[in-house]
Image (tube, rainbow, N blue to C red):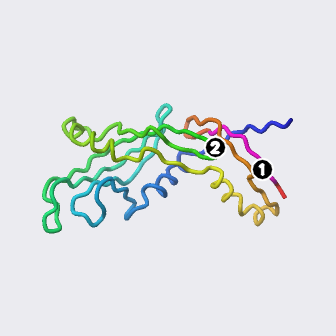
């Protein structure tokens, strides 16, 4: 019986691009937690920088908050721009690589600001984000005929586990690939 287990390495840079394309795809690469580009009072994050820390993925973002009351198209209140850190745990099921257990690690370096913003921001970050790894691999293999003369296709993919190792996300998989 043939062995079907393998590993798929996903670099931190590839995950960074996926995060930016799926979540930070608003105007100017922003993700709005509250409000929108046209509301005077809003909270958004931008400039995500991903790192791995232990068994979690950390994303440092620049938070921009205009807190107050909208008056004649302006936000009457205060503006804040701390650097914040959010972390997620990688997970996998079926063909999907996901991120769960999102939590705010740090809102700012100021205790008072953390006290005010932490409860609000904790409820505003996405609970999870998923990427269908099989679809991404199939898309990457679509051009195989032009580059190699062979049609390479992914027939089946099952994710067993995910772990962080160095600067890569290691995905243990079973899969079937056909070459025609």
Name the residue tied to disc 2. Answer: 94
The image quarter in which residue 104 lies = top left
Of the pair 134 and 53, the residue shown nearer to us: 134
Residue 83 placement, left or right of 113? right
Quarter of the figure that contains the N terminus = top right
Residue 68 placement, left or right of 120? left
Residue at image point 16% right, 54% down:
68
Q: Secondary structure at mark 1?
A: strand
Q: Residues within 10 Å of mark 1 (few under 14, many from 20)?
A: few
Q: Earlier in the sequence, mark 1 or mark 2?
A: 2
The disc placed on residue 177 is 1
Q: Which secondary structure is most common in the magenta stretch?
A: strand
Quarter of the figure that contains the C terminus = bottom right
Please say if 135 is above or below 99: below
Q: Is residue 160 magenta?
A: no
Q: Tell me where residue 73 appears, x and y as whole percent.
A: 17, 68
Q: Residue furthest top?
A: 54
Q: Residues within 10 Å of mark 2 (few under 14, many from 20)?
A: some
Q: Tell me where residue 26 appears, x and y as whole percent.
A: 39, 62
Which of discs 1 and 2 lies nearer the camera? The answer is 2
Q: Tell me where residue 172 appears, x and y as whole percent.
A: 66, 37
Please say if 133 is above or below 111: below
| Disc 1 and disc 2 in contact, CB within 8 angstroms | no
Residue at image point 66% right, 43% down:
8
Numbered range of the magenta stretch:
171-178
């Amino acid at each position: 019986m043939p062995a079907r287990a393998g590993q798929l390495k996903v670099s931190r840079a590839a995950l960074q691009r996926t995060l930016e394309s799926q979540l930070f795809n608003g105007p100017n690469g922003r993700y709005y937690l509250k409000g929108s580009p046209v509301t005077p009072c809003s909270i958004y994050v931008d400039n995500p920088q991903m790192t791995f820390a232990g068994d979690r993925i950390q994303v440092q973002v620049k938070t921009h908050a205009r807190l107050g009351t909208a008056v004649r198209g302006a936000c009457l209140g205060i503006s804040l721009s701390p650097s914040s850190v959010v972390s997620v745990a990688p997970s996998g099921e079926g063909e999907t690589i996901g991120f769960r257990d999102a939590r705010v690690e740090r809102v700012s370096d100021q205790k008072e600001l953390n006290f005010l913003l932490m409860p609000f921001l904790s409820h505003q970050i996405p609970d999870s984000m998923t990427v269908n790894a099989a679809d991404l691999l199939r898309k990457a293999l679509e051009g195989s005929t032009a580059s190699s003369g062979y049609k390479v296709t992914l027939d089946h993919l099952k994710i067993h586990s995910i772990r962080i190792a160095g600067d890569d996300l290691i995905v243990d998989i079973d899969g079937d690939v056909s070459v025609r």
